[in-house]
Image: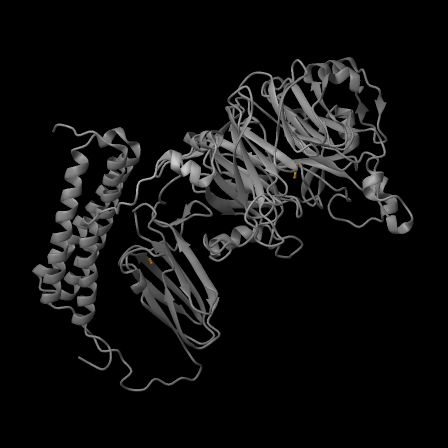
Amino acid sequence: MTGRRPSVAARAAGWFAISAALVAALVAAAPAAWAKETLQSVMKRRGLTQQNLLAAAKTYVPTGGRDEFVAFSSGGQSGMVIVYGIPSMRILKYIAVFNPEPWQAYGFDDESKAVLAQGRMDGRDITWGDTHHPALSETNGDYDGQYLFINDKANPRIAVIDLHDFETKQIVVSPVFQSEHGGAFASENTEYVMEAVQYAAPLGGEYAPLEQFNEKYRGGVTYWKFDREAGRLDPERSFSIELPPYSQDLSDFGKLASSGWSFTNSFCSERYVGGIERGRPPFEAGCSAKDTDYLHVINWRKAVKVVQDGKAVEINGHKVIMMDTAAKEGLVYLIPEPKSPHGVDVTPDGRYIVVSGKLDSHTFVYSFDKIQKAIAAGDFAGKDPYGLPIIDMKKALHTQVPLGLGPLHTQFDSKKGIAYTSLYVDSMAARWDYVNGKLLDRIPIHYNIGHLVTMHGDTVKPRGKYLVALNKLAIDRFNPVGPLHPQNHQLIDISNDKMALLYDMPLPLGEPHYVVAIDAGLLKPAVRYKVGTNTRTGKISPAKTRAGEEKIVRDGKQVTVYGTLIRSHITPEIIEVNEGDSVTIHLTNLERAEDQTHGFTISKYNVNGSWEPGKTASVSFVADVPGVFPYYCTEFCSALHLEMQGYLLVKPTGYKSKVGELMPKEEYTQADYDKQVKTNVETQAVIDEVVAFITSRNYKDYPDVVALVEDATDQLGRAEDAKAKAEEEAAKGNWHSATLWAGQWWQYQVKAADIGLRAKTYLEQQGARQVRK
Ligand code: K7E
Ligand code: CUA
């Protein structure tokens, strides 16, 4: 054997030692016992009340348990979406949307870079987003668990997340707005996703001085067409409606009784332009001078026809219905609404529209029926300066209810006619009856509640049960972590006559604005991809590579690597290029086992990626710095994870290789093969034991275990294939290849054993019954 390199035998010995240790670990299990504590003694020691225990019992999810609902929270300035479970309030995932996130490799691999590139504006990368309103896709007005949309208020954009894998698939940039806020909201069957302007500006991005505010500055609302088949928004079939410069705000789609209509608030119908430095009142005074602002009532279904009839103009290649057309065609109506409103929320039956004015202690309930009657009768109080008809407030109002100070947003209960409204100034949540106009109950929350969310609370079929208060500041609520505090989401039980506070959850990732919460059973995310999937397009990647097809292709200065990842090696293990070469590395994760993700990074080249089972993704860089750069897998994926490594060698320009540099060949022997087979036989004994346990229990009654058994069976099938290959090679006396295949056979066995053991533990914890065979 040569030099300082350990021999094959020595390295193999290390590998086998690990296998033996693993086998031992797989059989061992012995929990340690500690002094006994009782519920009473723990309550005393921690100073807990009966009330606390009740709250804990309502939120606690035992190990292995699942939450009843899954919440999707905007991540505010983080540009992400936060996913957490209700009632446990455990964070499950951060979904990267508008900015790079290394763990998901979003913005690191070429495929996701292409998604982020869709969000570029004026030729510039926007490396953050101010996410406000997530919206779940709907079928017949209820969540269907398929897609999630979210807006970026700062840079007017909407993103599409596919809930099949919780990945961002598309970002669309508003072709006409300079900022937005009233989005994303989905129509009853997700035909359209809405996005409304916030701060008025000339449509399409032109310059105009503030002196021309009334003439040139405009608001608007965009209806993005959603192509469900493609799972993408279709800019070609999307359109906007020009609106007055009233600072449009939140919006909502009508449903059932108000199907085909949408509603958008505004908070500065004064059309005030500020200018305190020019001796004028400040924005906040100028924008709240009048007692009322305008609710925009829009017939979007009719607007679709108006666009189809060719009555829209094009701005930046995007169809826009101008206000004179909107007025002539009867698309937009205005109704005065309480001063500086924020939320507008349509009731589950679609018959009422709830509007809260931040500066009015009443919450206003408009009747869709009355609005329609006024429109049909042509009964208008006048027109605004842009010719849009105004409906008299009294003629549209169903009732006004004094709920408290600073009402903002409203959600609905499974009980008919019951709503919940956040009271920002009072720091309370109110439960009230919007049909009979009665306040029923109020609960103090910790501080400055913004949005609130009930389960399916903005659909035709709210589920009730829980309410989450999204508090703007946490102040003194948690262990101090410096001047920048987390936010505070408070879980409230709404299933009884009195609302009850259950739990405080710190959220340390930007300021969330809105949350939507769906019955967890409606989400059906995949556990693996079809081998070779480009997850950002959903199509099979042309760079898909199977075992044995790995190759390195050179074309001039372009080096393309087609590689694979599987426990516990990266193929190829050596990539040699010349200084200045352009390198693209396509990798396919060949694993089929659940959660068997591999990572890949090359030191100092800012190369990073994440490959979930079946995924093909690519990293590209210019090898402009010569040297030796180790690459490795960044996920602790197996007992031999540290060995999942390789070298990128970047040869300096003009480097001449010298004789003797070639690596000597090292081959496994029959002894190596026999040793591996012995380990495999021992591992198989462990597997057989686990299988015997599982099949002796009523495991089929546990869907989680059935899924584990399927996964384990799949791994065992693969172990069988590798075993057959190993034996084939051994029969031919190809000991090197035979040993490699025996190693792969063992890798599959270990995974199968590992999955089986998890199933066994689960059955033990659940107290599964013995069954007769
Ligand atoms: Cu913060 Cu809906 Cu953007 Cu209200 S929004 S609080
Ligand atoms: Cu693959 Cu670590």
Name the one closer to the observer, 623 or 683: 683
Name the one closer to the observer, 447 or 121: 447
| Quarter-of-image position of residue 131 | top right
Instruction: Please give left or right for residue 306 compared with residue 508 in the image.
Output: right
Q: Residue furthest right?
A: 279
Counting every numbered tag in the picture gives 0
From the viewer's perspective, is residue 660 above or below residue 688?
below
| Quarter-of-image position of residue 233 | top right
Name the one closer to the observer, 441 or 174: 441
Query: Which quarter of the image is occupied by the C terminus?
Result: top left
The location of residue 747, given as percent across then percent down, is: 23, 54
Q: Is residue 561 visible?
A: yes
Instruction: Please give left or right for residue 437 compared with residue 599 in the image.
Output: right
From the viewer's perspective, is residue 572 above or below residue 588?
below
Instruction: Please give left or right for residue 160 compared with residue 680 in the image.
Output: right
| Colour style of the rendered protein structure | one colour
Instruction: Please give left or right for residue 737 compared with residue 200 in the image.
Output: left
| Quarter-of-image position of residue 572 | bottom left
The location of residue 252, given as percent across then percent down, is: 64, 29
The location of residue 586, given as percent across then percent down, is: 39, 59
Name the one closer to the observer, 379 or 10: 10
The location of residue 416, given as percent across then percent down, is: 57, 16
Q: Is residue 193 visible?
A: no
Q: Residue at x 72, y 29 (%)?
A: 405
Q: Residue at x 59, y 18 (%)?
A: 349
Q: Quadrant of ligand 1?
A: top right
Query: Which quarter of the image is occupied by the N terminus?
Result: bottom left
